[in-house]
Image: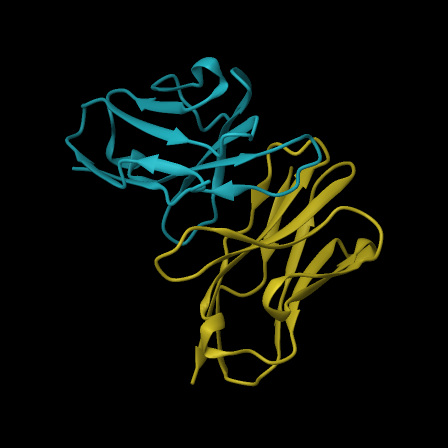
Amino acid sequence: DTGVSQDPRHKITKRGQNVTFRCDPISEHNRLYWYRQTLGQGPEFLTYFQNEAQLEKSRLLSDRFSAERPKGSFSTLEIQRTEQGDSAMYLCASSLGSRGDGYTFGSGTRLTVV
Amino acid sequence: AQSVSQHNHHVILSEAASLELGCNYSYGGTVNLFWYVQYPGQHLQLLLKYFSGDPLVKGIKGFEAEFIKSKFSFNLRKPSVQWSDTAEYFCAAGNTGGFKTIFGAGTRLFVKA
């Protein structure tokens, strides 16, 4: 078990372009979360999956954002028509079970929109 | 509204000093509480967690935290810090279902050797 993997580690894109990030959770974890973190702030909740079902989305997740978790394994987060305000670290985490045992985080994808 | 507030954004201590980082939360219903740590260049890691029972919980590396329900607080403590404790510490609160955990803004701790 190598933990939660995120790809890419860094992404620089021009404003208006689409970007997609991937997260591979710990294999036996059925829950997967996406968070966004900006400088000087803690992680902000974006969305959450239980298996393949997306069960909750934050209001932060505008219609330019979409997340999927096909087959309940890896997940992708796509941002369409990126804006400079989307520049942030995008964190993925996973967990097992329903008690909220704490999350295992990946190293994140740092997005810079120029 | 749900929120987690950390009292200090930056803390500087000398080695062997005692540490206490403040955390207050506002979260409806039964709450699970966490402290996460992020060492320089590393990902967020769980330091300790509270679900129920003994309000004094012990975590890794000599850290402990005390849940005081009447004060909506979950402060992190360590009797004697080491240079290797230099990191950013995040307090977090979540529901018993385990999703939508919210985080404080973090406290950056620097320990002088």
Quarter in which the C terminus of chain A is drawn: top left
Instruction: Locate residue B56, reporting x and y percent.
Output: 78, 62
- Residue depicted at 40% across the width and 21% down the height: A62
Instruction: Locate residue A23, reporting x and y percent.
Output: 39, 31
Please name whichever residue, A21 or A73, is drawn nearer the observer in this view of the structure. A73
Indicate whether B20 appears above or below B50. below
- Residue depicted at 62% across the width and 32% down the height: B99
Q: Colour of chain A?
A: cyan
- Residue depicted at 49% across the width and 25% down the height: A59
Please name whichever residue, B99 or B108, is drawn nearer the observer in this view of the structure. B99
The image shows a total of numbered marks equal to 0
The quadrant in which residue A64 appears is top left
Left or right: B109 as drawn, with respect to A77: right
Q: Which chain is yellow?
A: B
Instruction: Locate residue A77, reporting x and y percent.
Output: 36, 24
What colouring method underlies this structural image? by chain
Q: Residue furthest front?
A: A1
- Residue depicted at 44% across the width and 50% down the height: A41
Instruction: Locate residue B37, reporting x and y percent.
Output: 51, 58
The quadrant in which residue A96 appears is top right
